[in-house]
Image: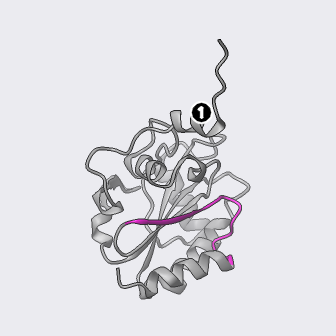
Amino acid sequence: MIRIVSLAAVAALSIAAAPAGVTSAYDVTMTGIDGTPLPFAQYKGKVIMVVNTASMCGNTPQYEGLEKLYEAYNAKGLTIIGVPSKDFGDQEFGSNKEVKTFCDAKFGIKFPLTETSTVKGPGAVPFYRWAAATLGPDQVPTWNFHKYLVGRDGKLIRAFGNKVQPGAPEVTAAVEAALASKS
């Protein structure tokens, strides 16, 4: 007997379930690029954009746009969290120190970065497993610089694919709407 399985079903099988106890971004703690805990709860009441990054990718210039977005909206309540990853083409440096040095020297990044992390599949860090389970398999990263927007309430608002630039009208409109929201 031959079974036909939809692509969505196949994609869903490659995504781990949301981690137990994670109902919002505020339930997640990652490790900062400096090795210290980075609890997302410290951003409670802010809008968060979580972006999987890579230093040696064709999309790496998006760091500049992310820093501009951060500078434009940080005082209004936006934070950006960069999550360096080797998941797509192994396009990240070998050590967290190299990533940090590159980001500081090349782009003057002021927003927080996590340690290099897995962002896809069942081995993904809890934030990415939760986001995949929440938004579905068609909203998971397929390359570097995939962006998740989280509202002031810690809930996911939407995702932007890697080809969407940080300064794109749909990104700034979504950020502004999220910042205007009380919840």
Q: Quadrant of the C terminus?
A: bottom left
Quadrant assignment, res 168:
bottom right
Residue 112, position in %: x, y?
43, 66
- The answer to whether residue 159 shows anywhere in this view is yes
- Residue type at numbered disc 1: Val
Q: Secondary structure at mark 1?
A: helix
Residue 7, position in %: x, y?
65, 37
At 53% from the left and 79% from the top, the residue drawn is 175
Residue 93 drawn above or below residue 50? above
Q: Quadrant of the N terminus?
A: top right
Q: Residues within 10 Å of mark 1 (few under 14, many from 20)?
A: few
User: Is residue 73 a member of the stretch shown in magenta?
Assistant: no
Total numbered labels: 1
- The answer to whether residue 68 shows anywhere in this view is no
The magenta-colored residue range is 155-168
* Horizontal side, residue 10 vs residue 116: left or right: right
**What residue is disc 1 on?**
10
Quadrant assignment, res 155:
bottom left
At 60% from the left and 57% from the top, the residue drawn is 146
Residue 15 drawn above or below residue 144? above
* Horizontal side, residue 29 vs residue 150: left or right: left
